[in-house]
Image (cartoon, grey):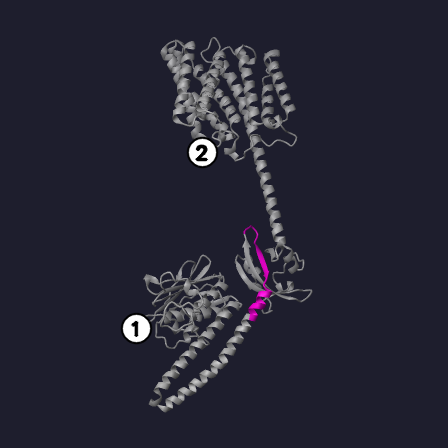
């Protein structure tokens, strides 16, 4: 409810309450202390619900008490009786409002504070609260009757309970229907249920067509005349039940509430005048109770139907909006996928093409089913042109839950024989049936460029190393001649040593440049790799190591390219052994674990460490953190490139207890193939020196491995 001024609102509510009390007083039979209808109780509860502050609610209760004291003096004798009547009405209104706040309004929002009551749950909360408050105050009104000189009767509290409960329900729910739009219940802004296309103007406001509303009013008036005037002695009151059911089923909540409220007041007025079937009840208290129960039943029936229809229409509106949004998203997805130059395809577990854009349909030659056991049938091969193994195919891995990032395949067009290189990404999709999405990007031009770069790097390295090799040979021959001359040639021998050192540094630089270029362009073919065996091959080229210098007994089997993993471990182990303080015996510990779908290889050392804030910079090419150690600054850059190509990462940290360096290599887990006895999230501790396990054919550690 919007109010221009709190004072105007207070005056309006006060006038409404006084008017309702006067109307109720006129429905009191002459031989009864209980009126047939007491709308003032409903107005008081509604007023309290509309008051947002404690002082405002206190003012409401003061007005209620004052008006009831004045009116009670007309009906009851004695100060005690008057005060009991006023107290009963104050407690009734306050108790009912408090119960409603607890049962339905505790989480109401400020934009629609009465919204939760505009629902079937809210209607039930009003009924329960009104009945409980009325029943709880019935002893007060019975005591007031006795204090006024009347006799005790069980009909008095019963009639009080029925009258006030029905009045509170009728008036409060009608006020809620008129003042609330129900946004708190379904978050829909429409005031009435969505009108049919033919409705407009008044028809849209009442929730039904104007002619139908006219027919309803005519039928209601006719039924009232027949039941209460033409044939009051016949049991035709059920006709009114049909009329109010019509109003609830066909019209908006506010229309139905106002219609039934007006009909109820007509029934009460006729009964108060001694007309109609309810007037046949001789006991005035029972007459009031029967009439109240009838109008309460009619009101609850109509409102239950109207609220149910409103909820149904709002849910239907929400469903239509969701369907429209889903169609819009589907159209957007179709437009995006159709405009993509990359091929996008979704495959089911049986190879059925669930979704494919035009680029994918061209690649598949229009096939609607992919032969998962024979990718070559659709022109897909490994980069070297060999068939793709079924058990290691991208589709097989994706359908069993593995995410594939940027793996290279070769595609041969069936009609033209054109060969293209495709970078394939794949991921499983959620759902009851296994399915996966594949994105294929044409990287033929990039691959050709990389091959050219690789060939150029090889050519440059060869052209640079040829004269370098000749220089190295002449240096060795000169060294032998100087040795033969003995002491007189000591100065020349020193100069020759410097020539040899520079030659070796030049050779290392060329080797590392070539290795860096190859790491950038190299293809990788992941397969199960025994980490301990790889480390053993690396250490086989280090006969200078003492026992226990490197410990590695992980039992881990990684999913990686064997050659590239060996290159990474050679660099990491080489760095760990090289970067130690003078006089310190190097100690390197290699461990591994599987956690959350990743395999982690950890290399700890007791070296000089990495300066604070430089743990990421060490992976940049040509970066050197420490002087006095040989290296080119390319080793860790090569390692980071290999890790990235595997979809993993390589990070540097300060070593355990702040000593040395910890290198962490993370690679996507290959699932089955993890070393025996190692569970997810458990570390595989190093137990024995890896130098005890030497495998022939080792890869020489890259001499350019450079941490700092």
Q: Does the magenta run of residues contain 451?
A: yes
Secondary structure beneath label 1:
loop
Marker disc for residue 534: none
Is residue 357 shown above or below 505? Answer: above
Q: Position of residue 608 (x, y in %)?
A: 34, 67
Residue at the image point whose x is 54% and y is 17% from the top: 265
**Camera-side residue: 587 or 430?**
587
Element under disc 2: loop
| Left or right position of 652 against 458 | left
Task: State which tag comes first along the sequence, 1 or 2.
Answer: 2
Tell me, for residue 583, which label it has, or none: 1
**Residue 237: image location, x then y, percent:** 58, 17
Above or below residue 178? Residue 75 is above
**What stretch of residues is rendered in magenta?**
430-452
In the drawing, does residue 520 fall left or right of residue 147?
right
Contact between marks 1 and 2 (CB within 8 A): the answer is no
Residue 107: mark in rendering: 2
Give the distance between the C-alpha atoms of the residues marked 1 and 2, in whole angstroms.
72 Å
Which quarter of the picture shows residue 82?
A: top left
Decide: few, some or many residues near mark 1? Use Cα within 10 Å; few <14, some 14-19, many ≥20: few
Crowd around label 2: few <14 · some 14–19 · many ≥20 (10 Å)? few
Taking the view exactly as shown, the residue that stands out farthest to the right is: 415
- Relative to the observer, which residue lies in front, 8 or 572? 8
Q: Who is closer to the viewer here, 683 or 405?
A: 405
Viewer can see residue 163: no
State left or right for residue 394 relative to residue 107. right
| Quadrant location of the C terminus in the rendered image | bottom left
Tell me the mark number nearer the camera, choosing from 1 and 2. 1
623 inside magenta stretch: no
User: Residue 401: horizontal and vertical position, in percent?
Assistant: 53, 56
197 left or right, relative to 661: right
């Amino acid at each position: 409810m919007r109010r221009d001024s709190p004072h105007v609102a207070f005056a309006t509510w006060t006038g409404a309450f006084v008017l309702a009390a006067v109307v109720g007083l006129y429905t009191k039979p002459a031989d009864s202390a209980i009126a047939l209808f007491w709308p003032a109780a409903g107005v008081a509860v509604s007023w309290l619900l509309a008051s947002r502050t404690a002082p405002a609610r206190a003012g409401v209760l003061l007005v209620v008490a004052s008006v009831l004291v004045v009116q009670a003096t007309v009906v009851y004798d004695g100060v005690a009786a008057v005060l009991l009547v006023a107290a009963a009405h104050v407690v009734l209104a306050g108790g009912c409002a408090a119960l409603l706040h607890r049962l339905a309004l505790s989480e109401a929002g400020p934009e629609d504070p009465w919204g939760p009551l505009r629902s079937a749950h809210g209607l039930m909360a009003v009924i329960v609260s009104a009945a409980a408050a009325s029943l709880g105050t019935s002893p007060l009104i019975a005591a007031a009757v006795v204090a006024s000189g009347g006799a005790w009767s069980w009909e008095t509290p019963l009639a009080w309970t029925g009258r006030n409960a029905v009045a509170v329900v009728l008036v409060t729910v009608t006020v809620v229907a008129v003042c609330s739009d129900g946004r708190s219940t379904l978050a829909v802004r429409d005031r009435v249920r969505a009108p049919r296309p033919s409705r407009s103007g008044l028809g849209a406001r009442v929730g039904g067509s104007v002619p139908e509303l006219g027919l309803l009013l005519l039928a209601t008036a006719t039924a009232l005349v027949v039941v209460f005037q033409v044939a009051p002695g016949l049991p035709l009151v059920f006709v009114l039940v049909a009329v109010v059911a019509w109003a609830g089923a066909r019209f908006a909540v506010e229309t139905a509430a106002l219609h039934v409220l007006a009909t109820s007041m007509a029934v009460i007025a006729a009964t108060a005048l001694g007309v109609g079937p309810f007037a046949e009840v001789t006991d005035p208290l029972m007459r009031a109770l029967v009439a109240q129960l009838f109008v309460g039943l009619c009101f609850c029936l109509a409102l239950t139907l109207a609220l149910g229809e409103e909820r149904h229409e709002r849910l239907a509106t929400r469903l239509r909006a969701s369907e429209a949004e889903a169609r819009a998203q589907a159209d957007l997805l179709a437009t995006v996928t159709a405009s993509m130059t990359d091929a996008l395809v979704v495959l089911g577990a049986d190879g059925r093409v669930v979704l494919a854009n035009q680029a994918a349909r061209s690649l598949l030659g229009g096939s609607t089913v992919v032969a998962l056991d024979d990718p070559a049938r659709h022109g897909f091969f490994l980069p070297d042109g060999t068939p793709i193994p079924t058990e290691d195919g991208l589709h097989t891995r994706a359908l069993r839950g593995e995410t594939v990032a940027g793996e290279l395949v070769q595609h041969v067009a069936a009609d033209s024989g054109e060969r293209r290189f495709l970078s394939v990404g794949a991921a499983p999709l959620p759902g009851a049936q296994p399915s996966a999405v594949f994105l294929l990007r044409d990287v033929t031009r990039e691959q050709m460029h990389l091959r050219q770069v690789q060939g150029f790097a090889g050519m440059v390295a060869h052209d640079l190393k040829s004269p370098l090799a000749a220089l190295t040979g002449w240096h060795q021959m000169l060294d032998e001649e100087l040795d033969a001359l003995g002491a007189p040639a000591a100065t020349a021998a020193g100069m020759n040593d410097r020539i040899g050192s520079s030659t070796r540094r030049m050779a290392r630089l060329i080797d590392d440049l070539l290795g860096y270029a190859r790491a950038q362009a190299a293809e990788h073919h992941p397969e199960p790799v025994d980490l301990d065996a790889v480390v053993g091959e690396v250490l086989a080229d280090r006969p200078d190591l003492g026992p226990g210098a490197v410990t590695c007994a992980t039992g881990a089997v990684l999913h990686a390219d064997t050659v590239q993993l060996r290159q990474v471990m050679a660099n990491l182990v080489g760095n760990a052994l090289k970067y130690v303080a003078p006089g310190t015996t190097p100690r390197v510990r290699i461990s591994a674990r599987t956690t959350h779908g990743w395999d982690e290889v950890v290399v700890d050392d007791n070296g000089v460490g990495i300066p604070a804030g430089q743990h990421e910079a060490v992976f940049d090419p040509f970066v050197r953190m420490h002087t006095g150690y040989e290296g080119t600054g390319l080793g860790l850059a090569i390692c980071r490139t290999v890790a990235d190509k595997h979809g993993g990462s390589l990070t540097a940290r300060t070593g355990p207890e702040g000593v040395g360096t910890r290198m962490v290599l993370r690679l996507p887990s290959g699932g089955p193939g993890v070393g025996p006895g190692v569970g997810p999230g458990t570390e595989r501790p190093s137990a024995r020196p890896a130098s005890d396990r030497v495998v022939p054919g080792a890869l020489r550690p890259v001499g350019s491995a450079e941490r700092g």
